[in-house]
Amino acid sequence: MSGLPPCPKCESPYAYEDRNLLVCPECAHEWSAEESTGADEDSLQVQDANGNALVDGDTVSVIKDLKVKGSSSVVKVGTRVKNIRLVDGDHNIDCKIDGIGAMKLKSEFVKKA
């Protein structure tokens, strides 16, 4: 048919274009064509302490001494962490640190190497 996406509010298939917006004739909802793609909504956006975007598999280095909860060990400044995995939550980096093991880190305490 028209190739236009259905209305995100009421799922009506009768949406039409009006200049740079898409309009639903049934509920009068208006939205931009970029919103309907939804490509950026599913991807996780994580930035390091300097504002650089991080992705799965990156190598980062720690910028602050971090105490390991439940242990007497400390992750020292400058420790390089390879092959990080981004997760959703308060601590948004899963990784393995040599000599310590599996850890969760906050992205605000690392920088991209």
Image: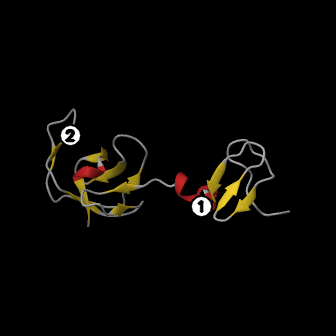
Q: Residue at x 72, y 61 (%)?
A: 17
Q: Which mark is residue 34?
A: 1
Considering only vertical position in the picture, is 93 above or below 54? above
The C terminus: image quadrant = bottom left
The amino acid sitting under disc 2 is: Val
Residue 111 location (% of width, % of height): 24, 60
Residue type marked 1: Glu
> Residue under circle 2?
68
Q: Position of residue 99 (x, y in %)?
A: 22, 51
The answer to which of 46 and 40 lies nearer the viewer is: 40
Helix, strand or loop under label 2: loop
- Calculate the distance from the C-alpha at mark 1 to the C-alpha at mark 2: 43 Å
Classify 10 Å Cα crowding around label 1: few (below 14), some (14-19), many (20 and above). Answer: few
Foreground disc of the pair 1, 2? 1
Spot occupied by residue 96 in the image (x, y as percentages of width and height):
32, 52
In this rendering, position of residue 35 left or right of residue 7: left
Quadrant housing residue 57? bottom left
What sort of colour scheme is used for the picture?
Answer: secondary structure
Per the image, label 1 sits on a secondary structure element best described as helix
Is residue 69 positioned above or below 23 on the image?
above
Question: Residue 57 got which mark?
Answer: none
Foreground pick, 83 / 88: 88
Quadrant holding the N terminus? bottom right
Q: Provide residue 110's location: percent of width, then percent of height.
A: 24, 55
Q: Residues within 10 Å of mark 2 (few under 14, many from 20)?
A: few
At horizontal 63% and vertical 59% (from top left) the residue drawn is 37
**Quadrant of residue 70 within the rendered picture:** top left
Residue sitting farthest toward the right: 1
Query: Pointer 1 and pointer 2: residues touching (CB < 8 Å)?
Result: no
